[in-house]
Amino acid sequence: MAVAMQYGSGGEASRLAGIGGGLKLELVWTNPNPDSSFSAQTVPMDLAGYSMVLILFRDFATNDAYGIVGTIARVGDYTALMFTAGGSNRTGRRRANVQTTGIAFEAGQYNATTHNEDGVPQAVYGIR
């Protein structure tokens, strides 16, 4: 499931929680360098108390025109974010392996080549 959201105003979690009625979202992690390239890496975080996570991504690190998109994944599963940007023929992708001890983000891709400016993680919310 993909969720499109505006990010940055601080109200993302409350807007999504209102949709689900009983969903409880908690901010678990924010990217300390949200406008920078993001290489493949594992980000440690305690996700043991959550059934799912919402991962917000900026589809291109240095261009706000494309916006923020999100994906929801069960803890213990892989998820993938795929997107096109700006009506162009640009296709981006980043996969993530969500485990109880953290998230292993794969390299970003742009038209099937490694491009770590695509799909830069911005924040992770735990969903109870």
Image (cartoon, rainbow, N blue to C red):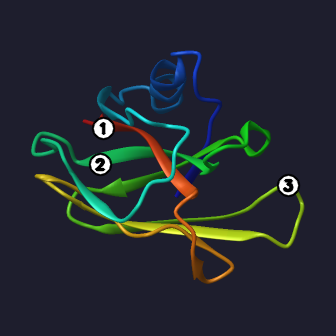
Q: Residues within 10 Å of mark 2 (few under 14, many from 20)?
A: many
Query: Of circles 3 and 2, which is in front?
Result: 3
In this figure, which residue is indicated by the disc labeled 3? 86
Q: What residue is drawn where x is 70% and y is 41%? A: 67
The residue to which callout 1 is attached is: 127
Residue positioned most to the right = 87
Pointer 1 local density, CA inside 10 Å: few below 14, some 14–19, many at least 20: many
Of residues 75 and 7, the one nearer the viewer is 7
Q: Position of residue 1 (x, y in %)?
A: 52, 58
Q: Earlier in the sequence, mark 3 or mark 2?
A: 2
Looking at the rendered structure, the secondary structure element under dot 3 is loop
Query: What amino acid is at disc 1?
Result: Ile
Mark earlier in primary sequence (1, 2): 2
Position in image of residue 119 (x %, y %): 55, 57
The disc placed on residue 30 is none
Question: At label 3, which amino acid type do we have?
Answer: Gly
Residue at x 53%, y 30% (from the top left corner): 19
Q: Is residue 46 left or right of residue 122?
A: left
Q: Residue 16: percent from the left, percent from the top?
A: 51, 29
- Residue 52's disc number: 2
Q: CA distance from mark 3 to mark 2?
A: 29 Å
Distance, label 3 to label 1, CA atoms, is 30 Å
Q: Quadrant of the C terminus?
A: top left
67 over 84 or under it: above or below: above
